[in-house]
Structure formats: structure tokens, C-alpha cells
Image (cartoon, helix red, strand yellow):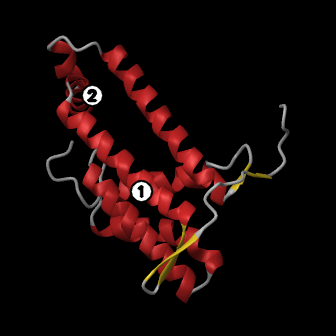
Amino acid sequence: MYWGADFRRMPTPYTEILHFGGLTIPAQRLLIIAGAFGLMGALHLYLKKTMTGATIIAMAQNREGAFLVGIDANRVAMMTFAIAGMLAAVGATLFAPINLVYPAMGHLLIMKAFVIIILGGMGSIPGAIVGGLIIGFAEALGGFYISNEYKDVIAFALLVVILSVKPTGLFTKGVR
């Protein structure tokens, strides 16, 4: 309410343009890539190497079985929600300087995240990574060869095509 619903630009301290061979990339986007990989690695280590991570995985695999062995489902659900909120806050902080900031700025990103999760397979972190890469490359190539106006539609069309071939997603082996 204080700032209103106007579109605003958030300044970035990383305005440099970096050149690696024939590749030109803004420093802010490189920071986003490094931050995303760092967060994925940290989340993976947290889930695989800590007792709390093991309880989260147990809850994701079988909620009733986790309850039967003494895991407090409400506490784990609240922790999972808090972790998701922290990851979303860091992601928004990284993303805001390259996009306009407004109250509904995350709607398209949430839809694309949904497509990536469904495409990769529910509960599969490697599937989410591969799904994100597939969507990213498809949008980049589609925007270049077809039209930049259709790049958002390409993600949903790709979801329909892949789910027509493999309805459970790409990486669902061993995941329920």
C-alpha cells in the first residue's frame, strides 16, 4: 500500500558486462545462475545430510508411515513451508534487478515453475533441474527462431507434448 501498484525498477550494483570467449553475459545474470546452483546444492545437501532433511524426505514419500515412526507432521510441514519461503525470497532478490518489480511479478514464474516440476517429475530434484534446462533452451531457441512474443507459450506447449508421451514426467522412476 505504501508504494502503490506502479511498476518500479530495482537498481543493481552489478552492471558490468562480462566476456568469456565469444559469450557475452551481464554480471547480474551470472550472479543469478551461480545463486541458483548454490541454492540447489545447499538444498540437496540439507535434505540428504541432516536429520531434518531426512524427515522432510520421509514425509514426502509416505506421510502416514512418517507419522507412525514418530515424525511430527505439522512441524515438518511448517519447516518445509519456511524453507520454501526462504528460497522464494532469495530467488526474488536475485530476479528483481533484471525485471520490473510490481505486486504480481511472480505469476508467470510460478506457472513456469509448475511446468518445470510437472515436466521433470514430482519429487525429483534432478528432474526439476533437467526440466528447467529443457524449458530454458526451448524458450531461448523458440524466441530466436519463431518469435520472442511466443516464448512463454512454448513452455506450455512443450509440457503438453512431453506429457502426451510420458504422462508421469521425465524422472519419476522410484518416486511416488
Q: Residue tagged by mark 2?
A: 56
Q: Name the mark nearer the viewer: 1 or 2.
A: 1
Front position in the image: 6 or 176: 6
Q: Earlier in the sequence, mark 1 or mark 2?
A: 1
Front position in the image: 75 or 64: 75
Q: What residue appears at the point 19 percent right and 45 percent down from the top-left corner?
A: 175
> Which mark identifies residue 34?
1
Q: The residue under label 1 is which amino acid type?
A: Ala
Q: Residues within 10 Å of mark 2 (few under 14, many from 20)?
A: many
Residue 53 point in image, percent of width and height: 25, 29
* Viewer can see residue 24: yes
Q: What residue appears at the point 16 percent right and 53 percent down from the top-left corner?
A: 173
Q: What residue appears at the point 29 percent right and 53 percent down from the top-left corner?
A: 121
Front position in the image: 44 or 28: 28
Q: Quadrant of the C terminus?
A: top left
- Rendered image quadrant of residue 61: top left
Spatial CA span between label 1 and label 2:
25 Å
Q: Is residue 162 above or below residue 3?
A: below
* Viewer can see residue 168: no
Q: Quadrant of the N terminus?
A: top right
Judge from the rendering whether residue 90 lies leftward or rightward of residue 108; answer left or right: left
Judge from the rendering whether residue 162 lies leftward or rightward of residue 147; answer left or right: left
Q: Is residue 176 above or below residue 80?
A: below
- Rendered image quadrant of residue 80: top left
Q: The residue under label 2 is which amino acid type?
A: Ile
Q: Is residue 39 above or below residue 152?
A: above
Judge from the rendering whether residue 67 lies leftward or rightward of residue 13; answer left or right: left
Element type where label 1 sits in the image: helix
